[in-house]
Image (spheres, rainbow, N blue to C red):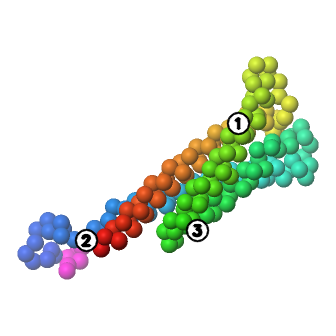
Amino acid sequence: MASRAGPRAAGTDGSDFQHRERIAMHYQMSVTLKYEIKKLIYVHLVLWLLLVAKMSVGHLRLLSHDQVAMPYQWEYPYLLSVLPSLLGLLSFPRNNISYLVLSMISMGLFSIAPLIYGSMEMFPAAQQLYRHGKAYRFLFGFSAVSVMYLVLVLAVQVHAWQLYYSKKLLDSWFTSTQEKKRK
């Protein structure tokens, strides 16, 4: 076989690449989806660390309550949302379907459910802010409910995409195992 810069192999015009092996589509899909899920997990970890920092500052009273308000109740169970992400990461090296399924189920319990509860818990404060312009909790001069709703919306999007890509990855892995069983 000739090098790229050298002469072409004798008897070919370069159009004989059709016979070469290709990577199966579900393997390509698996690599792409793992990469996308990892990016989302890293975004989730950044959000989680910011929430932990906010809660720590609030509980340890490192700053006055005018600067950082005490945490809402939904923030405590949301701290467990790091577990589904870690399970997802553990499922990647060996394509472990069990870990990925556990990750998806626990994401609903520890991530999505606290976010839904949080939106309901903060709704009266958001309504008060919208109707009367009065806020009672603050984060560095901003209304705490506004900032936390922004975090909540971002977290819902991250977890929804994580679930979507995890489902597609699970389907890709099932396709791979079904093909192995046929052979």
Which residue sits at x=72%, y=50%? 78
Nearest to viewer (mark 1 / mark 2): 1
Instruction: Tell whether position 3 is magenta.
Output: yes
Q: Which mark, by number, is residue 90?
A: 3
Amino acid type of disc 2?
A: Glu
Mark 2 surroundings within 10 Å by alpha-carbon count, few (fewer than 14), some (14 through 19), many (20 or more): few
Comparing 55 with 82, the one in front is 82
Do labels 1 and 3 touch, CB within 8 Å? no
> Where in the figure is residue 26, as x and y percent of width and height?
37, 62
Instruction: Name the side, left or right, on which 94 lies relative to 115.
Output: left
Instruction: Tell whether position 25 is magenta.
Output: no
- Extreme residue in the top direction: 132
Q: Which mark, by number, is residue 119?
A: 1
Do labels 2 and 3 touch, CB within 8 Å? no
In the image, the segment drawn in magenta is 1-6
Is there any visible trace of residue 144 in the rendered image? yes
Amino acid type of disc 3?
A: Leu
Q: Mark 2 points at which residue?
A: 21
Task: Tell me which numbered mark, 1 or 3, is placed earlier along the sequence.
Answer: 3
Task: Tell me which numbered mark, 2 or 3, is placed earlier along the sequence.
Answer: 2
Which residue sits at x=76%, y=47%? 75
Which residue sits at x=28%, y=67%? 22
> Where in the figure is residue 71, as x and y percent of width and height?
82, 44
Instruction: Name the side, left or right, on which 9 lies relative to 172.
Output: left
